[in-house]
């Protein structure tokens, strides 16, 4: 190798001088494999510009190729692709043929490099070249295929070299094949190969049975695995590795107790595990959630003289931290110190996460605080800040942060373990400020949050991050402090931080809540420049707020401006605008907006159609609403119960009861089950049309047939409707049922009953309704439209000798607040009262 290096150094000053190059590689008096190997390595490592076939030096060296030389050159390359390039070149040289050793050298290189495709091609090349192989050479190649996971290729090559007479395998070759198969769970293949070996009279040795045991374990075939294990034991082959195969398999398949029994058997036989096996088994036990067995094995590992590595302590402390068992986690930490295993930041983090409250964090600080480096100590303080904030101790968290800034302890922190000498109190980082600022914002202490934000940047030069800016802006916007939030946004941009979509949308939401259309549109323009989209919910909020204040037209203009900026509002926002226009009785404008939405290529959803149809029905334009129903069908939209309810209500108010009933039938045909609102609307419409029998039939269908439970509105509609139809006795029956269900009728229901009974000259029952109305506190006040009706009824009952005394008592007791005895006397009713 030294000769090669000297030769290479001599050539360095003349890299482009072909004459010198050729002279250095001119034929030597004696060609040795060593010299030839150096020259070939040099040429292929330098990768000459010309093709190898056109290289005169390679042509000169080609006749001297032999398998031993090729094998030497192959192993000299550090890169697999150079070796493969050389192997391919050698394959094509006249008079040269690869033998089993060169094939195995190339296979070994490709297998180590995990180059499966060229390795697969190499196994095919062996067969094409009809290269004879010894059983040992075949076994080596098979192992290379197995290491690369090419089990099928290994099995196929094994069969084909036999069928073509290239090799006759012995026990070693079979063992290599079984080893290749051991990484799979091909039980049938293993059984077949074992039968072949038995038929050929081969005796199974340890290296035969070990991979067989592995395959059975991989497949979870413990019946077969135990048979093999017992065979190994009977032949005296048992060792720690074989025990570990079975123990690991039990663990993998969730049979941890059996694995542990096997470990105890090993102990009884004085067979030990390796350190790696202990580690793998402990991790396996933990993966199966068997902490108890993992800890037992952990103790066995230590008793065997092994020092657990940091990975085991990390995973065990992690388990205890998840379970919030601080004592056990700290016990492991103390053990680490005894073994001189240095904890890393990950373990400290787990210990901190193990703490449930402030007290446990203080205890952790007391026990390991002085062992922590500055980074870990800062993490601990930040965790305490988080716990304090989460426990609503925001004032204490704020005071602790001031201590971290170098101030003295406040009264609420005096004597606290965290207020030691300044040299062990870490300076806060961005996370420290972020936790407290967020807590102050959520607690509504925005002035303190802003002050802390200022201290962060000015006093110690700790720059706020995006999260801190966002939390502060969000808190300010939640309290409607728009000017302050915009100032923070300007500072954020000045610092070089780019606002996120959240930043802009929090401010946008506040502007929408304020109904600040101009400000919202200005921000949308800014968002477009940043590539941010306004959140749909905020656009909808703006529309709803404007519509709530009867500014539906302005809401529509806002949506148009949003579209002009390149953002398409959601149908929810448009539906809110439609509803707003309808509420201010601008049905024509609503229809124009609806048609504009459709013309622009948007697809109104069922909610939008329902909103529009409801408005048309309220405006008594039911025919147009029906056209929209047909349009829904053409667009594949399925009308909802709300859709049909709007139409039924429209037809009922138009007096078209037959059309309303047809609509009900269509609901059944379309598989839409009517609800209480549907039936209540029909009952009300039929009663208004003077058709009480049909109204009662519809009511009975709702209750008895459909099993629907009417609410207060439904009961009151029926009672009121029956009264209008002159059937107060039936109305009272339903009133009693309503009250039995703990529902309270409104005053207008009692007024209707009283009027209906008076119309039938049934003054005693009218009095009963008055008394009940008074008891329920439902007598209408002077501003109620039913007050005049109730007052006239009282006066009429005063005129009747059967009811006058009771009415006078009610008035005298002040139970009818809007009528006094002086009112009665002014009506000159005394002469009517006996």
Image: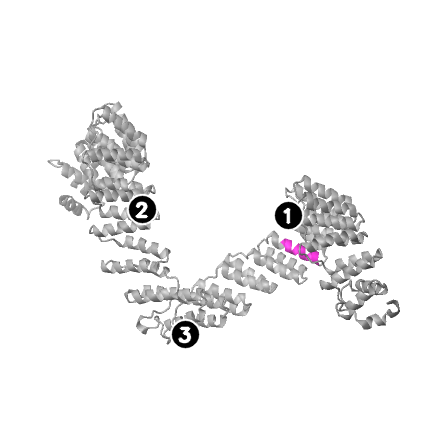
- Residue at which label 3 appears: 412
- Quarter where residue 792 is shown: bottom right
Labels 1 & 3 near each other (Cβ < 8 A):
no
From the viewer's perspective, is the residue at label 1 or at label 3 nearer?
Answer: 3
Mark before the other along the chain sequence, 3 or 2: 2
In the image: residue 546, left or right of residue 460: right
How far apart marks 1 and 3 lie (CA) works out to 59 Å
- Residue at which label 1 appears: 606
Q: Is residue 336 above or below residue 233?
A: below
How far apart marks 1 and 2 lie (CA) works out to 55 Å
Residue displayed at 22% across by 24% down: 200
Q: x, y percentage for residue 502?
A: 50, 59
In terms of secondary structure, where does tag 1 sit? helix
The residue lying toward the viewer, choosing from 62 and 703, is 703
The residue lying toward the viewer, choosing from 279 and 50, is 279
Residue displayed at 61% across by 52% down: 571
Q: Which residues make up the magenta segment?
A: 574-583
Q: Is residue 521 above or below residue 410?
A: above
Q: x, y percentage for residue 530?
A: 50, 58
Mark before the other along the chain sequence, 1 or 3: 3
- Quarter where residue 221 is shown: top left
In the image: residue 36, left or right of residue 407: left
In the image: residue 771, left or right of residue 81: right
Q: Quadrant of the C terminus?
A: bottom right
Neighbor class of circle 1 (other Cα within 10 Å; few <14, some 14-19, many 20+) is some
In terms of secondary structure, where does tag 3 sit? helix
- Residue at which label 2 appears: 284
How many marks the image carries: the answer is: 3
Q: Is residue 594 above or below residue 191?
A: below
407 drawn magenta: no
Residue displayed at 31% across by 46% down: 284
Neighbor class of circle 3 (other Cα within 10 Å; few <14, some 14-19, many 20+) is few
């Amino acid at each position: 190798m030294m000769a090669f290096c000297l030769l290479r150094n001599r050539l360095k000053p003349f890299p482009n001088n072909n004459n010198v190059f050729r002279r250095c590689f001119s034929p030597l008096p004696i060609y040795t494999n060593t010299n030839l190997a150096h020259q070939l390595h040099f040429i292929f490592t330098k990768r000459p510009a010309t093709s190898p076939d056109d290289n005169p030096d390679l042509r000169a060296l080609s006749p001297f190729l032999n398998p031993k030389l090729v094998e030497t050159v192959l192993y000299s390359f550090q890169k697999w692709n150079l070796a493969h390039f050389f192997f391919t070149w050698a394959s094509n040289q006249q008079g040269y043929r690869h033998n089993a050793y060169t094939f195995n050298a190339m296979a070994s290189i490709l297998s180590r490099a995990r180059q499966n495709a060229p390795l697969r091609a190499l196994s095919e090349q062996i067969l094409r070249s009809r290269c004879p192989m010894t059983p040992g050479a075949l076994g080596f190649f098979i192992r290379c295929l197995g290491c690369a996971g090419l089990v099928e290729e290994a099995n196929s090559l094994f069969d084909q070299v036999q069928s073509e007479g290239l090799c006759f395998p012995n026990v070693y070759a079979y063992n290599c094949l079984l080893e290749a198969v051991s990484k799979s769970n091909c039980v049938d293949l293993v059984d077949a190969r074992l039968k072949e070996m038995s038929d050929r009279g081969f005796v199974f040795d340890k290296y035969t049975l070990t991979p067989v045991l592995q395959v059975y374990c991989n497949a979870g075939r413990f019946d077969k695995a135990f048979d093999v294990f017992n065979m190994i034991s009977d032949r005296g082959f048992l060792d720690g590795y074989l025990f570990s195969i079975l123990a690991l398999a039990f663990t993998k398949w969730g049979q941890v107790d059996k694995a542990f029994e096997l470990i105890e058997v090993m102990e009884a036989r004085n067979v030990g595990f390796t350190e790696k096996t202990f580690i793998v088994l402990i991790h396996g036990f933990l993966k199966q959630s068997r902490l108890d067995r993992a800890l037992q094995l952990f103790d066995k590992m230590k008793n065997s003289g092994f020092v657990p590595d940091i990975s085991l302590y990390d995973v065990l402390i992690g388990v205890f931290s998840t379970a919030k068992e601080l004592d056990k986690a700290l016990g492991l930490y103390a053990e680490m110190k005894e073994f001189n295993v240095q904890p890393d930041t990950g373990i400290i983090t787990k210990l901190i996460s193990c703490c449930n409250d402030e007290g446990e964090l203080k205890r952790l600080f007391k026990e390991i605080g002085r062992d922590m480096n500055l980074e870990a100590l800062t993490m601990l303080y930040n965790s305490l800040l988080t716990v304090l904030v989460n426990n609503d101790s925001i004032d204490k968290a704020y005071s602790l942060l001031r201590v971290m800034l170098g101030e003295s302890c406040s009264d609420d922190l005096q004597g606290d373990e965290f207020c030691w000498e300044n040299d062990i109190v870490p300076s806060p980082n961005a996370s420290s400020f972020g936790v407290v600022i967020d807590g102050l914002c959520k607690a509504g202490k925005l002035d303190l949050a802003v002050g802390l934000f200022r201290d962060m940047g000015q006093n110690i030069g700790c720059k706020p991050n995006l999260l801190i800016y966002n939390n502060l802006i969000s808190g300010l916007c939640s309290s409607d402090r728009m000017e302050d939030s915009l100032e923070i946004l300007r500072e954020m941009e000045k610092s070089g931080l780019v606002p996120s979509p959240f930043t802009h949308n929090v401010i946008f939401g506040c502007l929408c809540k304020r109904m600040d259309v101009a400000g919202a549109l200005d921000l949308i323009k800014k968002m477009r420049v940043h590539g941010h989209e306004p959140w749909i919910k905020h656009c909808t909020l703006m529309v709803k707020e404007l519509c709530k204040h009867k500014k539906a037209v302005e809401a529509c203009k806002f949506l148009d401006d949003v579209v002009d900026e390149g953002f398409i509002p959601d149908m929810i926002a448009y539906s809110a605008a439609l509803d707003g226009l309808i509420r201010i009785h601008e049905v024509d404008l609503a229809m124009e907006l609806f048609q504009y939405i459709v013309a622009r290529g948007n697809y109104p959803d069922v909610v939008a159609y329902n909103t529009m149809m409801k408005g048309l029905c309220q405006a008594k334009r039911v025919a147009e609403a029906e056209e929209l129903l047909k349009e829904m069908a053409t667009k594949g939209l399925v009308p909802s119960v709300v859709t049909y309810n709007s139409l039924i209500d429209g037809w009922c108010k138009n007096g078209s009861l037959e059309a309303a009933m047809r609509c009900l039938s269509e609901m059944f045909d379309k598989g839409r089950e009517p609800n209480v609102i549907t039936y209540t609307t029909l009952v009300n419409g039929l009663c208004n049309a003077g058709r009480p029998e049909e109204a009662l039939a519809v009511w009975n269908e709702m209750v008895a047939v459909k099993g629907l439970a009417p609410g207060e509105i439904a009961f009151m509609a029926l009672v009121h409707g029956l009264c209008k139809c002159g059937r107060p006795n039936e109305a009272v029956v339903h009133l009693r049922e309503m009250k039995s269900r703990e529902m309270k009728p409104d005053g207008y229901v009692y007024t209707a009953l009283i009027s209906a009974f008076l119309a039938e000259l049934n003054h005693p029952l009218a009095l009963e309704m008055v008394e009940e109305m008074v008891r329920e506190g439902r007598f209408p006040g002077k501003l109620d439209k039913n007050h005049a009706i109730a007052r006239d009824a009282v006066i009429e009952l005063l005129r009747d000798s059967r009811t006058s005394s009771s009415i006078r008592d009610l008035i005298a007791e002040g139970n009818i607040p809007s009528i006094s005895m002086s009112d009665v006397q002014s009506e000159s009713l005394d002469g009517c009262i006996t």
